[in-house]
Image (cartoon, coloured by chain):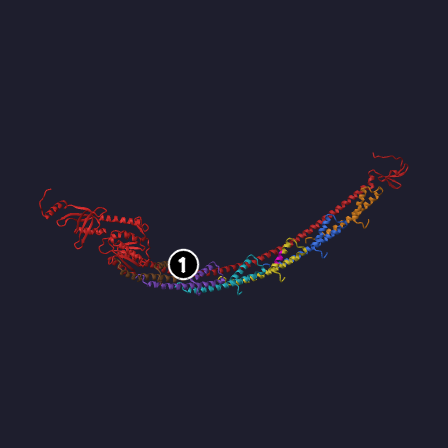
Chain colours: A purple, B brown, C cyan, D yellow, E blue, F orange, G red
Amino acid sequence: MEADITYEQAYAELKQIEADIQREAVSVDLLAIKIKRASDLIAICQAKLQKTENEVNNIISQMEKRPSNS
Amino acid sequence: MEADITYEQAYAELKQIEADIQREAVSVDLLAIKIKRASDLIAICQAKLQKTENEVNNIISQMEKRPSNS
Amino acid sequence: MEADITYEQAYAELKQIEADIQREAVSVDLLAIKIKRASDLIAICQAKLQKTENEVNNIISQMEKRPSNS
Amino acid sequence: MEADITYEQAYAELKQIEADIQREAVSVDLLAIKIKRASDLIAICQAKLQKTENEVNNIISQMEKRPSNS
Amino acid sequence: MEADITYEQAYAELKQIEADIQREAVSVDLLAIKIKRASDLIAICQAKLQKTENEVNNIISQMEKRPSNS
Amino acid sequence: MEADITYEQAYAELKQIEADIQREAVSVDLLAIKIKRASDLIAICQAKLQKTENEVNNIISQMEKRPSNS
Amino acid sequence: MPDSGTIRLSQLATRIEQVLEDAFSTMQFWVIADVTNHTHKVNSNYHYFELVEKVPGSDKLIAKFSAKAWGSGANELALFEKRTGQKFTNNIQVLIRVRVQYHATYSIQLDVTGIDTNFTLGVIEQQRQITLERLCRENAKHIQKRGEEYWTRNKSLQLPLVIQRIAVVCAKDSAGWQDFHHTMENNTYGYRFELSPYFTGVQGEANADAMRKRMLDIFNAPVKYDLVVIIRGGGAQTDFLIFDHYAVGQVIARFPIPVMTGIGHQKNITIADLMAHTSVKTPTKAAESIIDHNRRFQELLLTVQQNIIMKVQQGLVVRNGQLDKLRAQVTNDAHRLISLNKDSLYEIQQRIIGQGRAIPFQHRIGISNLAASLLSQPKIILAAKRKDLEHNADNIRYYQAAFLKNRREYLNYYISYVKNVSPESTLKRGFAMVIYNGKIISDPDLLNTGDKFSVIMRDKELLTTLQNKKDYNGS
């Protein structure tokens, strides 16, 4: 996985691949490569989402431990 | 914690984060950072709410030494 | 089979042969040769499609093994 | 039969003979010779057609043995 | 009969004789000779026609022995 | 009869005699002689005509014996 | 004037008492008077004072009576104080109901049996309206009457999100300060406040300037206060006039820090209340209101926190969904693309197969047609040629017959011509020939009279001699 691609970049690329495949602008020769790339991008995005989710959950649980209404 | 942020500043920043998140203007990449910041701002505000600075008390005690109702 | 012809090239050549045969621009002398070539091109394309399909299926099945929503 | 006349050449010559005879541009002295030539050309064309047809049928039957839509 | 006169030449000469007699450009002294010549020419032409017909018939019967549409 | 005068010569002389008499270039004393000559020439012509006709008829009858359309 | 003789002072007193009693004992009078020399004995609940009437605009007395209020009269005064918020004391004008009493030792005294609350309220209200009008008139930039409401600069100030630094104007050791302080310090949310008390007297109009001065102290303090709270309360609450005072109203209205009043006035709203940013009934309410204000901020924080958490969690779910959807789409599209290509290949193959078979077949038909055409043509040509030949032969036969016939006719002409011009024909028509010396002559001059010559007529020769010669002119 690329270390420095952002979620937004990965997602944008993914959408582009989807659009290309959708309007059949991908040659059969490249299809497998594109699908592989899409698969990688999805994995990257999922990992990033998972990481964000974990971080967010940590922050949230810390927030909720602080008694806001004591 | 920032020593010199006011409630107003903290609250404005918080509302901005909320608005950004609300209209999904925050990228996943920055989401955790934003949430952390929001969490910090809330914590700052709550801590300030429950804490007073004692420097003022000094002034008051000095004032009371002087007869206020002469 | 030619090792380095792409699907797109093979397909384009195939379409050309089809068009030539369709408007009877192929001499009887060359008909068998053209049909043979078309047959070969179809075989090449099918093989490439099959290969792509297998690859794509592999990638997809790997994608589906990864749980997207844990 | 001439070894190296093509179907197209043979057919063209045949058409020419037919046209000549049709507009009676052939002298009686040459008529038999022309007819003989036409007869030979027809034989050549038929043989070539037969050959092409056999070849084409072979190729087609091979193509049809391959499953195109698996 | 003259061996090397063609049908066309013979026919042309015949037409000439016919024309000469018609416009009475023939001397009485030569008329018999001319008529004799015409008679000979007609015979020559008829023989040639017959010969051509026979040859053509031969060719046709040979062609018809060959099956054209097997 | 003169053996070697042709029909055309005889006929020409006849015409000449006629012309001479017509323009009264013939004296009475010669007239009888001229008339005698003309009579002879006429006889010669008639004989030649008859001979030609006979010959021609022979040839034609031979032609007709040959079948033109066998 | 009759002299009644000498009597004892007590006798006189008795007689006066008798007269006064006859005249006034059944009567009570509502009188308007000013109160002076007022003393209140709290233990016995006796009020002693004087009722006076002055010349308007001066201190010169027109009338003066001693007065007292005991028992029910004292109760009436207590009720008055309670109802008006006005302490019964010196220098107030009252409408009061009195009985005239005479006592030998205290002389004439007016005994209070009732007091008109409304009269005093009216007077107070009148004074209040005058003060309000003056405030508006003299502080037009900072105080305006808008409809029935008063707008002041202080009202237009924004409360900070959180109130923590509070200047408290109150009386030292007052119950109001204690209530406020206690409520603030023991709030259930654990909020901490900096309370800076500025003690001053809060009753009596005389303290108005002192209160104003304390406000200026607050203004000049090095601390930036979030709020000024003016409180009084606890105990007997009777004198609120200070809060209707012009100087107090003015300083509150123009004060640059939001002012909250909590002065424990149950009945009326004072000018101070009208001028202040916020007014509540009691010091405790003031404290609660401030705590509530901070509490609202905390709730805002919590709401924002909840919103953010909710939205973030939603966003993550949505994004996961998007990824799933994208994955499904990409998968489907890839399959579709492959399938399309397969179909396309199949169709091309079918068309090539069809055409591959059709082309040789069409050529066969073409060749077959050509052959048929070629084979039928020679017979037609040969037949035509035969016909031509026959035609030629016929022509030659016809033309030679014509030729010979013409020749015969030409000869026949000459035959008849020769017959016509021959001498025999001429003689037959009656002409004769003259022969002289064996020769035919045509010149008559050759003959002379007596010459012998022969004349030929038809088939006879006539031998003659010339007898005479003369000219012949044809007639």
- Horizontal and vertical percent position of residue G196: 28, 59
Residue D61 visible in the picture: no
Where G52 sits versus C52, above or below? above
Q: Nearer the viewer, residue B52 or G293?
A: B52
Residue at the limit of the structure toward the right, as seen here = G450
- On screen, G420 above or below F58? above
Left or right for B39, reference A15:
left
For label 1, the SS is loop
Question: Which one is nearer the viewer's eye here, C39 or C19?
Answer: C19
Q: Looking at the picture, how far across and down is residue E19, in whole percent?
A: 72, 49
Q: Position of residue A19 (x, y in %)?
A: 46, 59
Which residues fall within the magenta stretch? D10-15
Q: Where residue G248 appears, x then y in whole percent? A: 28, 53
Residue G18 included in the magenta stretch of the image: no
Q: For the N terminus of chain G, give its image quadrant.
A: top left
Q: Residues within 10 Å of mark 1 (few under 14, many from 20)?
A: few
Question: Looking at the rendering, which quadrant does residue G414 occupy?
Answer: top right
Instruction: Please state which amino acid type lies under the numbered disc 1.
Output: Ala
Visible residue check, residue A16: yes
Q: Quadrant of residue G372?
A: bottom right
Picture mark count = 1
Is residue G29 left or right of G412 when viewed as pictured?
left
Residue lying furthest top in this view? G475
Q: Is residue A51 left or right of residue A69?
A: right
Instruction: Check disc 1 and report the residue beneath it.
Output: B25
Q: Would you say G214 lies left or right of E10 here? A: left
Q: Chain of mark 1?
A: B
On whether residue D12 falls in the magenta region, the answer is: yes
Pick whichever, G377 or G419, lies toward us.
Answer: G377
Q: Which quarter of the rendered picture does the C terminus of chain G lie within?
A: top right
Q: Main secondary structure of the magenta part?
A: helix
